[in-house]
């Protein structure tokens, strides 16, 4: 028989099959204290490694890999049609995941900070490539445990690192911890991403293990007889069999558990996770394509400069290119070059560079621009030019410099696009002579912008300003400010209502380009006048305490039969100049 020959070629004897089957059955016991200690410690190490952003610590948690036994048991159960093993393995895996996630949530709740590190971010966007890695890893792991160890076992540690079962589970716990204590939407996004990666690894390893165990014919009649004899003395197997036999659907499960039915089950599960994995893969491919295009532009721009403009006609070095960046602005590609030069470049030379580069990139010269930042290395020419023009050059005051700087910043913020449904409402600049420029962006949205998207937006702003050391931070203003409730037939602002209105007033005062939408409801037994009285009470409160004008509070009648008022922020116009710009020369 082919399967027996295949097993013999791999050096897997009949006795070894029996040992492997029984070892896997014993590995899913719930009574092994050392196993649960490994689960807790692996979860703790992985969680702290994710928080510390330490790959070495995370690898340590991977090597412990206590969950691999339960997943391989699922694969063996599908290969052999062993319902008792399948139920025991599933129960062990569910409890193990619950313990790991709960312990991770506990650790996260005790932390004073909850930043999404790069190690966490790397595990919340799985794609099809992760599925393929898990398939390969599960296959080689199954073969490795079936073969008798000869010398030092090198396959199992590699499989544990490649699959990384515990870190995604801890990402789920981290996300739940963030959702409970900090940001529900963001935490849920992190938890769902980590959960998808773990489920992908689980399904892929189970499937590849199932194929390997089928090919090795590990469920031969001799092995089955040996396992049946062992189960007559194993308490957990006896209890599980008793529970299953008392289930009305047990006979149906056994029929569905035929080999074709098992393949349909595993393929259906893979088909379910293919769609979200493929979406992530398409996004990854799009980002890589954009990065490749940008790298090509940078490479061509560097080559044109080095070949044509970096040297004098006699071959002597004229400039050194220290940094290059690309900025997409108003449908125009801006090439920003920072150079150290011994002689300044004229406008004609800069236009010539644009013409040559446009021909290389096969673009129209009108779609390209050059922002040249020159740092002189030989100051004589510069000093001479300054001396000659000194009498004709007007003196620029600090106020004019600040105004020019703010105008350049305002120009850089034009056409900044935020991911929907976020809207840019305001920004704040803080700068002094000691620290780098700090920029705070305020945006209106029901949920936080993804951390990866925030990073891309920050890079875009730094590139537009030509200030790579600028620190960019984004702060969300929620569109929904809450609900206040009035007593029946009354319009008095209670202290509880005042707190919510104070929060709304503070935001409206800070951001003049925001309006407040007030939706007033009434009970069926209340008079129509109560709507106007409640809206006037809110408007008057905001006007007297927070100086919010009447035209910024828009009232409308709600369709609900209850005594509440919903408060919602809306953007009334395009972004204004910064509401609070601190230019501190000290």
Image: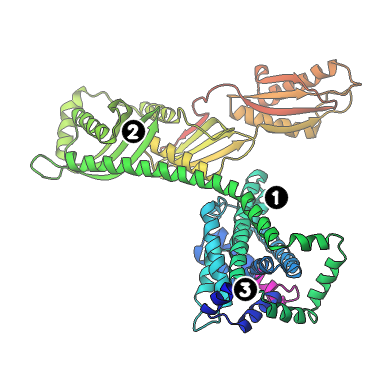
Q: Which residue is mark 3?
A: 217
Taking the magenta stretch, the answer to whether it contains residue 564 is: no
Q: Nearer the viewer, mark 3 or mark 1?
A: 3
Name the image quarter holding residue 406.
top left
Q: Which residue is mark 1?
A: 180
Q: Mark 2 or mark 3: which comes first in sequence?
A: 3
N-term-proximal mark, 3 vs 1 = 1
Q: Is residue 159 visible?
A: yes
Residue of label 2: 334
The stretch drawn in magenta includes residue 30: yes
The quadrant of the rendering that contains the N terminus is bottom right
**Left or right: 380 in relation to 27:** left
Q: Main secondary structure of the magenta part?
A: helix
Asked which quadrant contains residue 435, the reply is: top left
Identified at 59% across, 49% down, the residue is 274
Secondary element under disc 2, as helix, strand or loop, is: strand
Please identify the quarter of the rendering in which residue 422 is found. top right
Q: Residue at x 31, y 37 (%)?
A: 336
Q: Position of residue 344 (x, y in %)?
A: 19, 35
Regarding residue 44, the answer to whether it shows in the image is no
* Magenta segment boundaries in residue numbering: 27-39
Whether tag 2 and tag 3 are in contact, CB under 8 A, the answer is no
Residue 195, percent from left and from top: 64, 54
Discs 1, 2 touching: Cβ within 8 Å: no
- For the residues marked 3 and 1, what is the alpha-carbon distance in whole angstroms? 48 Å
What's the residue at 19%, 24% (across, down)? 391
Mark whose residue sits in front, 1 or 2: 2
In the orientation shown, which residue stands out farthest toward the left? 314
In this picture, residue 223 sits left or right of residue 276:
right
């Amino acid at each position: 028989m082919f399967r027996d020959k295949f097993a013999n070629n791999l050096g897997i004897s009949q006795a070894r099959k029996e040992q492997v089957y029984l070892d896997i059955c014993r590995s899913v016991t719930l009574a092994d204290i050392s196993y649960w200690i490994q689960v807790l410690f692996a979860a703790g190490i992985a969680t702290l490694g994710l928080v510390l952003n330490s790959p070495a610590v995370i690898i340590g948690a991977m090597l412990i890999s206590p969950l691999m036994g339960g997943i391989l048991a699922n694969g063996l159960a599908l290969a052999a049609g062993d319902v008792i093993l399948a139920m025991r393995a599933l129960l062990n895996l569910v409890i193990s995941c619950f313990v790991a996630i709960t312990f991770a949530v506990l650790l996260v709740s005790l932390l004073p900070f909850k930043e999404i590190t790069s190690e966490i971010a790397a595990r919340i966007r799985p794609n099809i490539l992760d599925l393929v890695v898990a398939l390969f890893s599960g296959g080689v792991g199954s073969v490795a445990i079936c073969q008798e160890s000869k010398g030092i076992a090198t396959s199992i540690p590699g499989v544990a690192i490649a699959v990384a079962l515990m870190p995604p589970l801890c990402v789920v716990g981290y996300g739940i911890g963030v959702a409970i204590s900090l940001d529900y939407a963001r935490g849920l996004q992190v938890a769902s991403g980590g959960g998808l990666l773990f489920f992908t690894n689980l399904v892929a390893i189970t499937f590849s293990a199932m194929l390997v165990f089928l090919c090795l014919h590990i469920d031969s009649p001799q092995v089955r007889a040996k396992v049946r004899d062992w189960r007559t003395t194993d308490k957990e197997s006896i209890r599980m069999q008793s529970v299953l036999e008392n289930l009305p659907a047990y006979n149906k499960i056994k029929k569905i558990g035929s080999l074709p039915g098992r393949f349909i089950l595993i393929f259906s599960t893979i088909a379910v996770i293919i769609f979200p994995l493929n979406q992530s893969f398409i996004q990854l491919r799009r980002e890589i394509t954009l990065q490749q295009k940008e790298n090509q532009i940078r490479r061509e721009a560097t080559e044109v400069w080095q070949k044509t403009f970096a040297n004098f006609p006699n071959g002597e070095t004229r400039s050194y290119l220290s940094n290059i960046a690309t900025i997409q602005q108003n449908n125009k590609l801006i090439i920003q070059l920072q150079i150290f030069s011994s002689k300044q470049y004229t406008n004609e030379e800069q236009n010539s560079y644009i013409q040559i580069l446009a021909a290389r990139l096969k673009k129209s010269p009108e779609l390209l621009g050059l922002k040249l930042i020159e740092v002189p290395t030989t100051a004589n020419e510069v000093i001479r030019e300054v001396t000659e023009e000194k009498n004709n050059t007007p003196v620029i005051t600090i106020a004019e410099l600040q105004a020019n700087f703010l105008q350049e910043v305002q120009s850089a913020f034009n056409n900044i696009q935020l991911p929907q449904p976020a809207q840019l409402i305001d920004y704040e600049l803080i700068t002094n002579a000691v620290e780098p420029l700090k920029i705070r962006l305020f945006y209106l949205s029901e949920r936080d912008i993804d951390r990866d998207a925030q990073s891309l937006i920050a890079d875009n702003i730094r590139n537009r300003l030509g200030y790579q050391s600028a620190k960019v931070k984004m702060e969300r203003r929620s569109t929904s400010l809450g609900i206040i409730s009035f007593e029946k037939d009354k319009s008095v602002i209670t202290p509880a209502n005042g707190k919510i209105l104070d929060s709304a007033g503070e935001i409206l005062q800070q951001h003049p380009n925001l309006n407040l939408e007030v939706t007033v409801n009434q009970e069926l037994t209340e008079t129509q006048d109560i709507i106007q009285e409640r809206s006037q009470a809110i408007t008057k409160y905001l006007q007297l305490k927070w100086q919010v004008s009447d035209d910024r509070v828009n009232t409308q009648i709600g369709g609900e039969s209850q005594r509440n008022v919903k408060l919602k922020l809306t953007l009334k116009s395009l972004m204004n100049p910064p509401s609070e710009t601190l230019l501190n020369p000290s």
